[in-house]
Amino acid sequence: MGTRYKGTEKEMTALNAFIKLVRAAESTISRVNASLVKSNLTESQYAILDALYHIGPLFQKDLGNKLLKTGGNITLVIDNLEKRKLVERERREQDRRYFTIHLTKQGKSLFQKVFPGYLKAVIEEMQKLSKSDQVELQRLCKVIGLPSGASKK
Amino acid sequence: MGTRYKGTEKEMTALNAFIKLVRAAESTISRVNASLVKSNLTESQYAILDALYHIGPLFQKDLGNKLLKTGGNITLVIDNLEKRKLVERERREQDRRYFTIHLTKQGKSLFQKVFPGYLKAVIEEMQKLSKSDQVELQRLCKVIGLPSGASKK
DNA sequence: TTAATAAAATTTAATATTCAATAAATAACT
DNA sequence: AGTTATTTATTGAATATTAAATTTTATTAA
């Protein structure tokens, strides 16, 4: 496993930690996503429905920030969701640059149908770790996820 | 942070661990990938050059398995690398279904130019954690990354 | 040996993703 | 007011990604 590169111990530790982190995330995501196949939702589409359901209507800009995606990407995924009438764009009258995206009745209903299976898949993945290890993983990932130099004032 | 969903403690722990894992991986990847911009390599292209450099020539099938990508995807990324003359396909005479992919001189040279910066970026990311925490992260991710039911005989 | 099966790679169609350029609307400034 | 700058969203071009169908080659079975 890990890298074949032979370097200093410090390099090897960092490289192996990075590789295992990325692998763990990617393989877990792909298994969890299998729960979305039945409803013909992609991961990106699901992520948007999830945000809208649990947070409420959002601007495209906010969705992009939350999901770490570019504006162009959000535009297209919203387009595809809108074609299926799962979400709607609504122009904001106070500031017409914004579109508020909200779930339609069908979008809400589809999400409610899909979420339990998604949650179940996540739990199945995470239960490979004890509860305390899951908490430990949260701690480590929280640090790693911070933007570089976040500790600087 | 974490999910807005309100469920049982077990659900919340699993969901938050999953979300933080995915976030940590994605945000780290995007920062590390910034080191590839100068050389006009995408993440996928870099991953293939890396594998070929550190492991040696591989069949497309092997690359797909190693990188967790489909055959169709590998075909296209190899196409794009081949256009830039960074890799070459070589038909295997013993079994003409296979192509051996190997680095060209230019591919090897480009990789050698890019790798130090990539490694530096990885180290910078991982040094947010102490060495022992990096090792701990490896341990947790190794478990998480295993296929579900891997413990079953 | 022929027929069926399997395996590696390619192609096609659909969606995703980024970056860069553009359009439209608002905000800020003189 | 009028110009400039900023912000949100869209578009276009390039690459990525998957799933499913197809092609080519090799293996197995009858």
Image (cartoon, coloured by chain):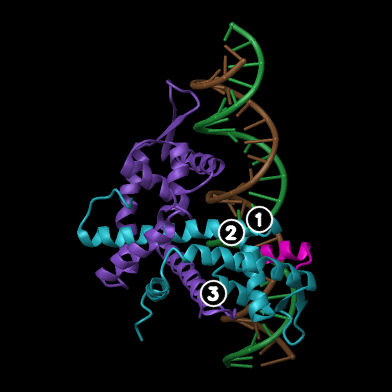
Chain colours: A cyan, B purple, C green, D brown
Q: Which residue carries the number 2 mark?
A: A33
The answer to whether dots 2 and 3 both sit on one chain is no
Kind of element beneath mark 3: helix
Q: Which residue carries the number 3 mark?
A: B11
Q: Which residue carries the number 1 mark?
A: A37
Residue B3 appears in the rendering: yes
For mark 1, does the 10 Å Cα neighbourhood hold few (<14), some (14 to 19), or many (20 or more) residues?
Answer: few
| Chain ID of residue with mark 2 | A
Kind of element beneath mark 1: helix
For mark 2, does the 10 Å Cα neighbourhood hold few (<14), some (14 to 19), or many (20 or more) residues?
Answer: some
| Chain ID of residue with mark 3 | B
Q: Amino acid at mark 3?
A: Glu
Q: Tell me how far mark 2 sits from mark 3, CA to CA.
A: 17 Å
Furthest-left residue in this view: A8
Q: Is residue A76 magenta?
A: yes
Q: For the magenta stretch, what is the residue range?
A: A72-86
The answer to whether dots 1 and 3 both sit on one chain is no
Q: Tell me how far mark 1 sits from mark 2, CA to CA.
A: 7 Å
Quick check: marks 1 and 2 in contact, CB under 8 Å? yes
Most foreground residue, A121 or D30 = D30
Of tags 2 and 3, the one toward the viewer is 3
Of tags 1 and 3, the one toward the viewer is 3
Q: Amino acid at mark 2?
A: Asn
Left or right: where B37 falls relative to B2: left
Q: Main secondary structure of the magenta part?
A: helix
Q: Residue at x 46, y 61 (%)?
A: A25
Most foreground residue, A2 or A126 = A126
Furthest-front residue in this view: B153
